[in-house]
Amino acid sequence: MNGVDVSTMADVNTAHDTVLEIADLSVTFRGGRPRPWAARSVVNAVAGASLTVRRGRTLGLVGESGSGKTTIGRAVLRLIEPAGGTITAAGFRVDEFRGSPPAAYRRAVQAVFQDPLGSLDPQQDVRQILAEPLRIHFSLERSARETRVRELIDMVGLSTQQLTRYPYELSGGQRQRVAIAKALAVEPELVVLDEPVSALDVSVQGQIINLLAEIQRERGISYLFIAHDLSVVRHASHDVAVLYRGRVMEVGPADRVCGSPRHPYTRRLFDAVPDLTAHTRRHTRSRVRQPADLLAQLPDLGVAPTDGGCPFFPRCPHRRVECAADFPERAPVPGGGAAACHALTDTP
């Protein structure tokens, strides 16, 4: 990705302490009624997801729209209540919270969302936006708050002249820098980044990713980085987890997952990214097959997938009968990480 300094993504902390541990997480939503007199259906947005984020590292969550990426982030932030499983973040058992999370947890786990214009108070200027979390969480004198606000604005690469501006007076990149500064104001251990650069120009995306990496290197903060853009996830993350319809299909070091994917869905996901370099542009049409053509070539095993089976079964070129009813445990793969696929037992 243009403008990204990959060297800034070097490990900032080799310690193996865990900041976020998600085990067998399930999240369900009430769906529609198949018939007016019938009970509402249940949508399994996340099913049995297990993920780990180490201190000072970034875990990227990637997958198609509706794969459950944002749902996992919202469960970690306690914006929705999980149906099952456990979430341990910054030493807190998030799934055991009843009512509003304690203030200590809200300090330890912060969020940066896709649309900063929607998450920043339009009636406050930048100084007020950054001072508000300091006023809520810390007993600081006004002069101390002002000093901290100036430190934050400098940390994210903005000038003190912008402290008197309102969100609508800033560019998209500047607004996202303010949102990052607000999240960092209370010195969190974990920041959930939900599509933080998807609404920005490519050059600005690189600047924001480099900024996040620099802050991480200096302060040892952990990130849960949610995105659909594969190139962004590869450059912004140390580790990557690939989701499909609520299931974690593959997880591992970013370079290995993106450079040598093992799960059939991960391979299909990366194969779908157009390669429009001068050398390959003329071959793109012949190289990329349409989904209808791919589905027509899949073997008919005479079975239909069940709720407990692999959700990729209908589209998988390596599908087996057992895939329809049984979602496998993740198995280690060469190069680090693991993938959940019965077909991996046949591959070296």
Image: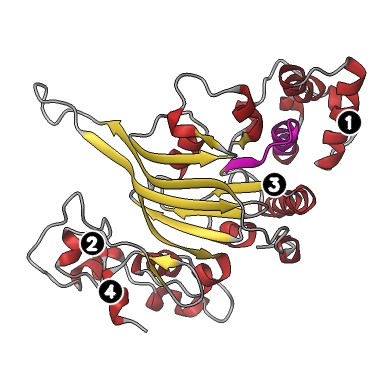
Residue segment shown in magenta: 175-193
Residue 173: x %, y % from top left: 72, 41
Q: Please name the amino acid that badge 4 sits on.
A: Ala
Residue at x-position 49% and y-position 35% = 93
Query: Which type of secondary structure does the marked residue at label 3 adopt?
Result: loop
Does the rendering let one see residue 275?
A: no
Q: Is disc 3 surrounded by few (<14), some (14 to 19) or many (20+) residues within 10 Å? A: many
Residue type for callout 2: Phe
Cα separation, mark 1 vs mark 4, equals 55 Å
Separation (CA) of disc 4 from disc 3: 37 Å
Marker disc for residue 150: 1
- Verify whether residue 180 appears in magenta: yes
The x and y percentages for residue 8 are 75, 61
In the rendered image, which quarter is residue 119 located in?
top right
| Disc 2 target residue | 313
Instruction: Tell which circle, 4 or 3, labels the residue nearer the N-terminal end.
Output: 3
Left or right of 113 on screen, residue 304: left
**Mark closer to the chain start, 1 or 4:** 1
Residue 98 sits above or below residue 64 on the image: above
- Label 4 or label 3, whichever lies nearer to me, is 3
Identify the colour scheme used. secondary structure
Location of mark 3 (residue): 221
Q: Give percent across and percent down for residue 118.
A: 60, 27
Q: Which mark is residue 324?
A: none
Q: State yes or no: discs 3 and 1 in contact (Cβ < 8 Å).
A: no
Label 3 sits on what residue type?
Ile
Are the residues at dot 1 and dot 4 in contact (C-beta closer than 8 Å)?
A: no
Q: Pointer 4: what residue? A: 343
